[in-house]
């Protein structure tokens, strides 16, 4: 065998060995729900970074339930490279562990964000010993501020419930609904109608709300027309439908709530939740995740529009946890395509992003406990 032939044989043997070692990279069939193939894009505006004071008069807390860095990155990819979140110049991370588990659930995560207290999975507004803890929404009420809750899930679900109720179990939906009656919350919009009106104890809380002066409405068009007064918008029997099928609009609900709450001269606190980013993560469904992420970001756009004009409003955007262990396997910003990969059908223990805009935003940079987010908001509001 001559030298030239020996070189060729050696090359072929080496290539064959290399190829066989790379077999693990062979593409597998990808479920169609993991591929977002592109869709309508919206223009993202840039808002000014100048504010009237160093501390806020109002606080808007926005929780993308289940929203990790991959969910945000997916949204950026499919919207052509930009989200409203890019207006947030102060960015950090939150450690999400609960008091009894490395992987938090939404109840413990929500309670940490509402009260600054770590608690066990399943707990709603109580500490690890099941004693009630005061939430930032309740503190705001005590100071005479306006308060609100908006959610694409049932308003009695874990995250919104943890700001207004005190229960040992997140599954006590009717008890959570009854806790709304013990507060002076000005605006709440979300699902969960049956927990107020179709109860085992036969109480009709919608009638009781009306007796307390609330406008109790179920239709989004009617809700959006409300300009003042107390509003209870119950837009579904339980959870709202998925985006874009649901009749409840998160961006419109955000705008409506902010217009009402801003009439209080003492300021306001509101929590707005994009609940179903989490649902899409549980389902390992990229299309679901992306649609909900974009809907949440457009609601963030409405909050930014208000805060930029107002100059005294702090917006904090974060998550209670990440869901699905989502990664991005491929994407294309030009056509808005992304392929998601998932490691779990449940929550994960990774840190989640924290974005802040407005007076006091610089306090939310860096790595922090989820409880620190609540404590910083409370401190900035003077509680």
Image (cartoon, rainbow, N blue to C red):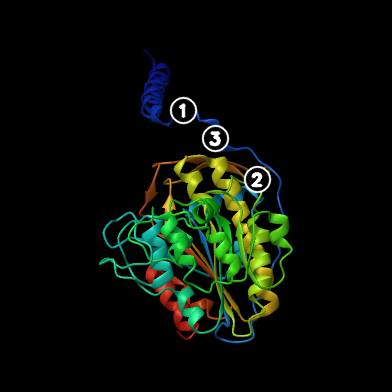
Nearer the camera: disc 1 or disc 3: 3
Q: Residue 145 in the image: x percent, y percent?
A: 56, 81
Q: Hey, which quadrant is residue 188 in on the image?
A: bottom right
Q: Quadrant of the N terminus?
A: top left
**The residue tagged with tag 1: helix, strand or loop?**
loop
Instruction: Tell me which residue sits at (73%, 56%) in the image.
Output: 221
Crowding near the residue tagged with mark 3, few <14, some 14–19, many ≥20 C-alpha atoms within 10 Å: some
**The residue tagged with tag 3: helix, strand or loop?**
helix
Q: Are marks 1 and 3 in contact (CB under 8 Å)?
A: no
Instruction: Tell me which residue sits at (50%, 30%) in the image.
Output: 30
State whether residue 299 is above or below residue 281: below
Q: Residue furthest front?
A: 202
Distance from label 2 to label 1 (Cα)?
30 Å
Q: Hey, which quadrant is residue 272 in on the image?
A: bottom right
Q: Is residue 59 visible?
A: no
Circle number at residue 33: 3
Circle number at residue 244: 2
Nearer the camera: disc 2 or disc 3: 2
Circle number at residue 28: 1
Question: Sequence order check: which comes first, mark 1 or mark 3?
Answer: 1
State whether residue 329 is above or below residue 247: above
Q: Give the camera-side residue of 138 and 180.
A: 180
Q: Are marks 2 and 3 in contact (CB under 8 Å)?
A: no
Distance from label 1 to label 3 (Cα)?
15 Å
């Amino acid at each position: 065998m001559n030298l030239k032939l020996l070189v060729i044989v050696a090359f072929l043997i080496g290539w064959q060995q290399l190829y066989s070692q790379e077999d693990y990279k062979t593409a597998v069939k990808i479920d169609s729900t993991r591929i977002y193939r592109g869709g309508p894009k919206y223009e993202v505006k840039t808002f000014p970074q100048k504010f009237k004071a160093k501390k806020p008069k109002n606080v808007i807390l926005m929780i993308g339930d289940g929203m990790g860095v991959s969910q945000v990155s997916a949204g950026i990819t499919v919207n052509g490279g930009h989200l409203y979140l890019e207006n947030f110049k102060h960015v950090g991370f939150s450690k999400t562990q609960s008091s009894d588990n490395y992987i938090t659930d939404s109840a413990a995560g929500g309670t940490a964000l509402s009260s600054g207290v770590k608690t066990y999975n399943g707990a709603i507004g109580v500490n690890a010993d099941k004693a009630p803890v005061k939430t930032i929404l309740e503190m705001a009420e005590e100071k005479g501020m306006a308060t609100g809750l908006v959610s694409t899930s049932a308003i009695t679900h874990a995250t919104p419930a943890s700001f207004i109720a005190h229960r040992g179990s997140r599954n006590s939906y009717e008890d959570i609904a009854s806790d709304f009656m013990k507060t002076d919350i000005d605006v709440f919009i979300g699902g969960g109608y049956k927990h107020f009106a179709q109860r085992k104890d036969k109480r009709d809380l919608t009638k009781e709300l009306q007796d307390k002066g609330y406008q109790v409405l179920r239709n989004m068009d009617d809700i959006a027309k409300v300009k003042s007064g107390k509003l209870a918008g119950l837009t579904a029997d339980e959870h709202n439908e998925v985006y874009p099928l649901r009749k409840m609009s998160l961006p419109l609900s955000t705008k409506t709530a902010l217009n009402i709450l801003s009439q209080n001269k003492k300021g306001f606190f509101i929590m707005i939740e994009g609940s179903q980013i989490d649902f899409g993560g549980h389902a390992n469904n990229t299309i679901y995740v992306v649609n909900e992420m974009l809907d949440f970001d457009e609601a963030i756009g409405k909050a930014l529009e208000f805060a930029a004009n107002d100059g005294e409003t702090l917006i904090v955007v974060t998550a209670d946890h990440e869901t699905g262990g989502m990664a991005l396997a491929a994407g294309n910003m030009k056509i808005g395509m992304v392929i998601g990969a998932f490691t779990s059908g449940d929550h994960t223990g990774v840190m989640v992003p924290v974005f802040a805009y407005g007076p006091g935003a610089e306090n939310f940079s860096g790595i922090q406990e989820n409880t620190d987010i609540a404590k910083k908001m409370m401190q900035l509001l003077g509680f």
